[in-house]
Amino acid sequence: MPDLSFHEYVTVAFFLSTLLFLAIASFVNGVYSRRSFALLAIVTGAVACIGMVSGPVDRPAWDDAIGTQIMRKGSSGGAGMGGGGAAAQGQAGGGRATKQAAAEAGDGGDGGDGADAAAGDKGFVRVLSPAGGKNVDSRSFQDCLHCPEMVPVQPGDAQLGGRAADPRTEAAELPQRLVRLAKRFAIGRTEITVAQFQAFTTATGRAAPACAGYATASGDKPAECMSYADAEAYIAWLSEISGRMYRLPSASEWEYAARAGGSEAYPSGDVLEPQVANIGSPAKALKTAGSYPANGFGLRDMVGSLAELVSDCWVANLKDVPSDGRPTLSASDCARRTLKDAAWWELPILARVSARRPLDVTTARPGVGFRVVRELD
């Protein structure tokens, strides 16, 4: 059966029925007159034009490599994305990211048939949650039942680091520099949740974080007390059960996704309004993942909630950071990795998009979590 929308089926059926009717009418009249053929050409041409102008209803504009593999549940594993992120999954869409208004809360959508997607299943669960902006690949997806919800992000340019003229900018955020991400990637809509991390510890027998913030949290809360070692172990397991290449975001990818085309200190502007992020007050407590409005790419909790680990080794400034979005891995201080954002009880100045600080790879402290990236190209 051809992969056509309902609208396209109706257009084709109308076209064929019109053609049949005029042919029968010509036979009844007993002649194939020029007038009959002229009428036939005019009517059928009009039907075709109407179909092309009105266009299909809800036909995915996304039916490329990623649409084929993600939106059709039950697809085979396809080209594997091995350790080096090889096996391209389609051509990257060009264009510079443009700033979009932050989305209102509400991530409804029709969750796919999760009953068929047990842990380890290579099939896909279709999740059509409305994203906040008009990013081309705005539909989210899950690779397996226990996999996080991912939002594809188009390539583009962004400023990494803080503005020298901003008095809040620290030395570690300078010099500000342009980074150009040439490939699409998908990033978690929220931080990894307790339920998602528990699926990993249950399956592997790895010890759960020992802090009370993790042990007493409900499954829909972001998982805190995460070390870099915890994140890497979870990601290795996630890549294995999904058959896809997952990893931590680089600092450049994280900032690009957080800014969503903007250039201000926070995704919502240079001044952080209290209603757009869970930050700055211990009394607020850690809330359900995704409780606050999304940014222009449809991502939630990019400010506040938890501080987030990224893959970069710690460096004192941005002078030698790669300009293509790759993480800094050649630094001498890889015993420490980089933290972005801040926990809900910390000061908002630490949650600026450009803010960064180090964390030892073996340290698991309250208020630290992570979100993941999946390679698409």
Image (cartoon, rainbow, N blue to C red):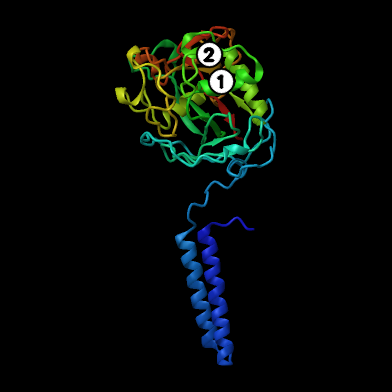
Left or right of 166? Residue 3 is right
Residue pointed to by mark 2: 226
Considering the numbered disc 2 on the image, is that residue within a helix, a strand or a loop? loop
User: Dividing the picture into quarters, in which one does residue 31 lie?
Assistant: bottom right
The mark lying in front, picked from 2 and 1, is 1
Which quadrant: the N terminus? bottom right
Quarter holding the C terminus is top right
Q: Residue at x 59, y 46 (%)?
A: 64
**Quarter-of-image position of residue 108:** top left
Side of 294 where 373 appears, left or right: right
Residue depicted at 63% across the width and 14% down the height: 206
Discs 2, 1 touching: Cβ within 8 Å: yes
SS at circle 1:
helix
Distance from disc 2 to disc 1, alpha carbons, whole Å, reads 10 Å
In this rendering, is residue 117 above or below 356?
A: below
Q: Is residue 303 above or below residue 56?
A: above
